Each structure stands twice: as C-alpha cells, then as structure tokens.
C-alpha cells in the first residue's frame, strides 16, 4: 500500500480530508512536528502522540550524515529506529541546498555539500535522495528540489524551477519502493507565472501528492499569504497539498484557507527551547519577570500535560535556573497548541464557520491599534 486521499468537507477553499498511509490515517489539515534527526527535540514518542500528532517529519540530509541511512535500514527502518509507529514524511534535503550556501555547489547533476559536522564531502543527486529515503522507509518521500531564496533574481529563480522539474522527473524514474509515496515540490517564489509553469510540468508527471516549497525563505509573510490561494489552486484537487516549512500559527490558518492539507515547521519546539509559548491569547515570554509569581497555567483550558500540572511561575523558574525540563514542557505545550489549532480548524470547516474562526484568531493575535 502507498497512500490514498479523500476530501470530506469544504468551506470555501478550506477542506478536511483523510490521508491513509501504510502506518495509519492522517486527518487533514494536519501539522507535522519536525523530527529532523529521528527525534522531535526534547520530546518522547509517547508525548508527541499525546498532543494529537499523527504524522511527523524526518530529514534525508541529516539522517544520511548521522547515523547513516544504511544503518537505519539495518535497524529495521526509521519507524522502528525512533519507536514511532505512525506515519512519517521525509524531506529530501532540498532545503539544505538553500540553507548551506557556503558549503555546497549546485549543478544539474545534483548538489555537492561539505558536511556541517566534519566537512566531509557529500553529493546529493535526485537518485541518491530517493535511495536514502527508501532506506529510511518513510511513508511519504519528497523529490529533491532546488529552493532559491525569496529575493533571488529572476534568472536564478527560473533556473531553479527548471532544475526542480528535471530532478523531479529523475526521482520519479528512480523510485521503486511500493509502500512509499513520492511527492513533488513546486517552486517559483512569489512569481505566479513561474509557479504555474512548474506546477503544470509536475502535475503532468502524476505524483501521488504535491508540495509548495520556497515559501518563508525571506519574502514578507503578506506576500506569501497573497500568493498561497493561487498557488494551491494549481495543484490537483483530489491529491494532498503540503506547504513546506511554514510556520507561525497565523500562517497555518492562511494556508488552510487556501486549501492546504499538510504543514511542518520547527517553530513550536524551537520557540519552546527559547521560553516562548503559543496560546490562543497570543504568545507568552516565560523569562519575563511578570511571570515570577503567576500561579496560572500557560493557557486556561488547554488539555496538555504542561498546562494541567504546572504554573507560569514554575516554568519561569525552570528557565531562570537553566533546567532542561523548561524547554521540554514548553515544547510539549507548543506542539499540543499547534495540533489543537488544526483540530479546531477541522471542526470549523465541518461546521461551515472556518472564515469566522480564522478572523477571530487573527484579531486576538494581532489586535487593531
């Protein structure tokens, strides 16, 4: 079995659906916690599952460097290796082509890297990216793409789109694992004509699912929000749509409004490690002195373990004392908040009130002066 996808309810472009994979069903729209190195930082698999997460993300580039994709295959695959029995999506390493600018060289053949760990050389071709992900055994694998920065000049953006299309075709030819689905990635920045050209070529290749890459890489959030509805509409309506690496809670709601089904971002755990908590009333900075004697939970009514047991005063103390439990408890709450936001969005779509739900959230997070 690879995957099947079914749309259930719609409210404008927003939609709910079910994505069935070899390791379980994912109700969409869904946020995927990021487990780059076979771990969602600071959290156990049981804790992640308790947040409502039904799918997580791993990364080809990092896992092939350490511990090695062949070792993970020898250990029974990524699910068994990290003790996560639900679906996994693996990124191809294309974002590292974007982020490791001082350590890589890109040609049509692939991307040559210097390892950020020890400087050893690594060549990531479309074929190699597929082989690594087949060794990992993820439910969903991503094609290798080139992700240019948002301010890339037009010629560089066009060349990245051309190369992304070329690499996608090579990935599709090389992919052979029947219990794994390969998704394509549409690039083109905020140039809607270039996005349309990239999508047209990739849709003709008939991938099981499609992602929008190259957002949240330097462009203003407002520019992304304007482009998302048009870009999402370029993708097949009957297949899952994935917005890569985005982002803030408000970005997720804009993505859902545009018809996106899957999201991922390191923001919940990275913010948790830096004493920032997300709530429906807006963010809280737990290092602030005003929390030192506050007996309230992070968020009233939140069912997560952190809010059910600990006060803001205690969490403030943990960060002041540099105790590792502080980042764990805040990361746990933040991931739970993101999953609760997605569950509430799904319920609002089913009830035909998603627009009102989104507007109320945005008004609370960004009140008018």
Image (cartoon, helix red, strand yellow):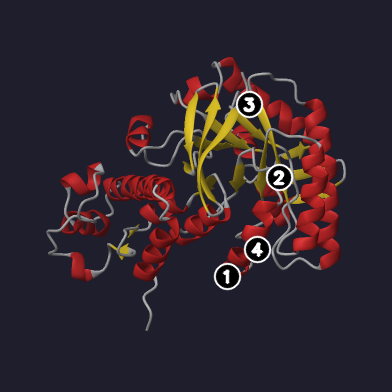
Nearer-N-terminus badge (3/2):
3
Residue 195, by quadrant, is bottom right
Per the image, label 1 sits on a secondary structure element best described as helix
Q: Which residue is mark 4?
A: 227
Tell me where residue 235 appears, x and y as whole percent. 69, 47
Q: Is residue 321 visible?
A: yes
Q: Residue at x 72, y 26 (%)?
A: 131
Mark pair 3, 2: CA separation: 22 Å
Tell me where residue 362 appears, x and y as whole percent. 41, 66
Q: Which residue is mark 2?
A: 185
Per the image, label 3 sits on a secondary structure element best described as helix
* Residues at discs 2 and 4 in contact (Cβ within 8 Å): no
Mark pair 4, 1: CA separation: 9 Å
Label disc, if present, on residue 222 of the rendered structure: 1
Nearer to us of marks 3 and 1 is 1
Q: Residue at x 36, y 65 (%)?
A: 360
Q: Residues within 10 Å of mark 1 (few under 14, many from 20)?
A: few
The front one of 342 and 322 is 342
């Amino acid at each position: 079995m690879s995957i099947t996808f079914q749309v259930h309810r719609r409210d404008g472009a927003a939609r709910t659906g079910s994505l069935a994979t070899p390791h379980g069903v994912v109700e969409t729209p869904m946020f995927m916690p990021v487990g780059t190195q076979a771990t969602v930082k600071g959290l156990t698999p049981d804790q992640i599952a308790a947040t409502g997460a039904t799918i997580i993300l791993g990364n080809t580039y990092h896992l092939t460097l350490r511990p090695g994709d062949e070792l993970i295959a020898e250990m029974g695959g990524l699910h068994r290796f990290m003790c996560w029995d639900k679906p996994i999506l693996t990124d191809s390493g294309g974002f590292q082509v974007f982020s490791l600018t001082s350590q890589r060289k890109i040609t049509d053949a692939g991307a040559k890297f210097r390892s950020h760990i020890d400087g050893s050389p690594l060549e990531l071709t479309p074929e190699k990216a597929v082989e690594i992900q087949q060794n990992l055994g993820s439910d969903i694998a991503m094609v290798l793409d080139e992700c240019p920065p948002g301010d890339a000049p037009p010629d560089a953006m066009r060349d990245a789109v051309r190369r992304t299309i070329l690499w996608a075709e090579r990935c599709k030819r090389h992919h052979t694992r029947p219990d794994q689905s390969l998704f394509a990635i549409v690039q083109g920045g905020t140039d809607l004509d270039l996005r349309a050209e990239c999508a047209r070529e990739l849709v003709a290749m008939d991938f099981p699912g499609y992602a929008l890459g190259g957002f949240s890489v330097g462009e203003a959030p407002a520019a992304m929000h304007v482009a998302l509805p048009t870009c999402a509409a370029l993708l097949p309506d009957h297949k899952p749509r994935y917005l890569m690496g985005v982002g803030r809670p408000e970005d997720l709601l804009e993505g859902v409004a545009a018809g996106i089904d899957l999201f991922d971002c390191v923001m919940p755990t990275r913010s948790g490690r830096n004493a920032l908590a997300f709530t429906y009333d807006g963010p809280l900075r737990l290092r602030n002195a005003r929390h030192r004697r506050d007996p309230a939970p992070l968020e009233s009514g939140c069912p997560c373990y952190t809010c059910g047991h600990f006060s803001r005063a205690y969490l403030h103390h943990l960060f002041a004392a540099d105790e590792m439990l502080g980042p764990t408890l805040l990361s746990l709450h933040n991931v739970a908040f993101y999953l609760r936001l997605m569950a509430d969005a799904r319920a609002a779509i089913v009830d035909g009130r998603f627009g009102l739900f989104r507007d109320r959230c945005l008004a609370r997070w960004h009140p008018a002066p």
